[in-house]
Amino acid sequence: MSYEPPIQRRPRKTFDWSSASIAVAVAVSAVIVYRRDGQARFLEILFSDFSLFIDILPKVLAACLIAAFVAVMMPREVVLRWVGAESGFLGILVATLAGAICPGGPITIFPIAAAFVAIGADTGAAIAFITSWTLLGYARILVWELPFFGGGFVIWRTLISVPLPIVAGLLARLLADLVARRENSR
Amino acid sequence: MIFLVDGLLWVIALVLGVLAAVRSPVLLRDSVKEGVVDCVRLIPRIMLGVIGSGYIAAILPEQVVGHWLGADSGVVGLLIAVFGGAFTPGGPVIGFSVGAAALKGGAGTPQVIAYTIAWALFAVQRLFIWEIPVMPERLVWIRVGASLLLPFLAAGTAMLIGRP
């Protein structure tokens, strides 16, 4: 049986200058905490961070596997039909829903969105998708936001955010039209 | 709750794995390999973001942040929150830990919502590191333009309904 080749993702480096700048911030903060609050507090933070890391790891593995499966099994013609240039308001709704249920991190979401645009997804739909993934994506909410903020805050923050991807998608279409018109009038 | 969530992620992964295996064992093998490699590549970043983020949260001047973003800080507080969100560096953990610390330090929830949404949607560092290299640049700027209003909309809604 044949299958479509996976969406090309750019190889990512494990370490770059953004990671390096965080490493510097972490090191400086750790030294400040050690000198200001002493060794006991320093170790307490270290252990609590480490247990959070152990807790997160299996979720990240599951999310990476889901992303890999989705990337290879996503049928292209479905993309065109549902979120293509002619998809209208429904396209933005579909993209919002897709973003909310699409797992994976920003590193996988941007290349996938770019691939959608390349095979015919509309600007508004692509932006609704990215916005929805960012604000409503379940994996991100559950893996990252919940441990920090707790249930009450996260539930309300999410509910309030539900219309936002649609707003962003519609505004993006307006902006894209404006940009196109300006370029045409030149 | 957390256990349920972990379980759900793995149930989805397993169902997709079975679907892939039905299509072809090669597809399953390649996808699993890619997923595992992706995860392994992410580990250094996650370690960096998680182990040590506690230190960054610990040295944040919580009273100052709480004062700036306090419940009485109003529109100025919202502007500071959105600006701060856009210029907060780092991976997934930094912005959330800053937001959580601000909340503990007495910040108003609409301001914290504005902060986390601004940071999630248009943190400058992420735009340059991840998005501009892979997306058409015009689309990135249209997206940012269309997103600028959203933190204010969310904060306004939170103020109106009085939640969370």
Image (tube, helix red, strand yellow):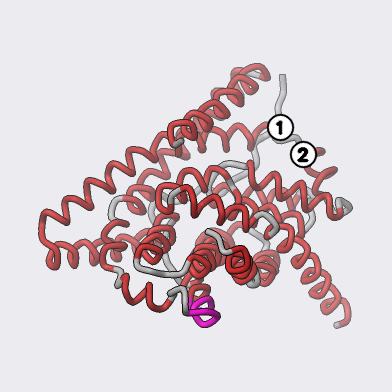
Comparing B98 with B109, the one in front is: B109
Seen in the image, is A111 located left or right of residue B67? right
Rendering coords of residue A88 (x, y %): 86, 54
Against B146, is A58 above or below? above
Magenta stretch contains residue B78: yes
Q: Which residue is mark 2?
A: A76
Q: Residues within 10 Å of mark 2 (few under 14, many from 20)?
A: few
Q: Which residue is mark 1?
A: A4
The number of numbered badges drawn on the structure is 2
Residue B30 in sight here: no
Residue type at tag 1: Glu
Residue type at tag 2: Arg
Task: Name the residue at 61% across, 63% down.
Answer: B161
Residue B96 in sight here: yes
Check the picture and name the quadrant holding the N terminus of chain A: top right
Rendering coords of residue A72 (x, y %): 65, 33
